[in-house]
Image: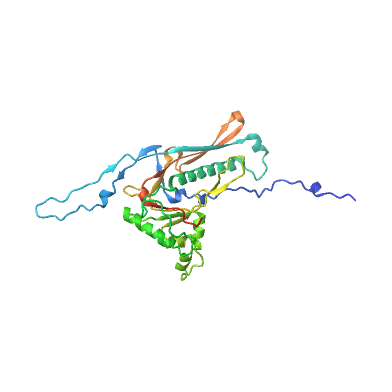
Amino acid sequence: MSQPTRSDVHVNRPLSNLSVAFIQKQSDFIATQVFALVPVTKQSDRYFVYDRKQWYRAVARKRGPSTESAGGGFDVDNTPNYFADVFAVHMDVSDQIRANADTPLNLDRDASLWVTQQLLLKREIEFVDAFFQPSTWTGSTSGVDITPSSKWDAAGSDPVDDVLAETDAVKERTGWRPNVLLVTPQVHRALKSNASILDRIKHTQLGSVTEDLLARLFEVDRYLVARATSDTAQEGIAENMQFLFGTEQALLVYSNPSPSILTPSGGYIFNWTGFFGAQGGMRVKRFRKEGIESDRIEGEMAWDMKLVAPELGAFFVDVLTP
């Protein structure tokens, strides 16, 4: 006897309350959590750098009757500068495709999200290239990159002591104590299970090794895990997803949370807000492309990742067992 089939009584259509998109959380992009955004009104300009040596060398002397006081001073370098390159990306939303789109698709919204994600991803990549690389930071005990004698995932290692030794080195060299420790997810995982760290907290009330706890152990204001990821394969090739910050590295650095006159920082992100507006220096706009019967969603940002004081940081390499 004939009976209706499943396809006779139901035609599959898109769900109106569900869609799937792999959009990274904005909190995973940590560039501006490490170094402050410095809003600038002009695309390029200069800033002043005082000679540190002349502020730390003691020149005051005992003064005798009817004699002049000891004299001195300091030099100012006005040659350092920034130039905020403009980065842009767009997506075109066709009239025909928009009119034919099913709920819950909203192509204008989705295009804005995609454009924003692309700019944040590019900024994160630029941050890695500028700051999270070997041979960049000079504030360590040796003035070069640090490779722990005992890997942080090995028995007998003491990552806290390793980091505090470099903290003291930067402080002694510059007068400023690092306040940020940035690690990769792999390094973070190794630290959470490191025997010496677990031994340090065994008498505390905490049941797990949290990022806040690690910040206290390493004596920094911010302990950050670089979790942003990207597909490094070319379009049309099988994806190759990788963490942007690599695997076996860590950065210990002083970052000024409130940029101001007469205060140092390992780095700054100069953000051209004079052109793009105050919303983090990002502008997303929509305009008509009548020739292709589409609306263009375009985003722009402008920044310069500036290494300001390399002596305020120490970079760890090869901290895990190969």
Vertically, is 21 above or below 292?
below
What residue do we see at 43% from left, 45% from top?
A: 130
Whole-percent x, y for residue 164 in the image: 39, 60
Q: Residue furthest left?
A: 66
Whole-percent x, y for residue 132 in the image: 45, 48
254 lies left or right of 3: left
238 lies left or right of 73: right
What residue do we see at 39% from left, 56% from top?
A: 179
Q: Residue furthest right?
A: 1
Answer whether residue 268 is visible to the viewer in this image: yes
What residue do we see at 50% from left, 62% from top?
A: 192
What's the coloring here? Answer: rainbow
Given residues 277 and 210, the one toward you in this image is 210
Whole-percent x, y for residue 126 in the image: 47, 43
Q: Residue furthest bottom?
A: 203
Q: Residue 234's image quarter?
A: top right
Given residues 126 and 153, the one toward you in this image is 153
170 lies left or right of 277: left
What residue do we see at 43% from left, 51% from top?
A: 34
Tell how many labels.
0
Whole-percent x, y for residue 270 in the image: 41, 43
Answer whether residue 219 is visible to the viewer in this image: no
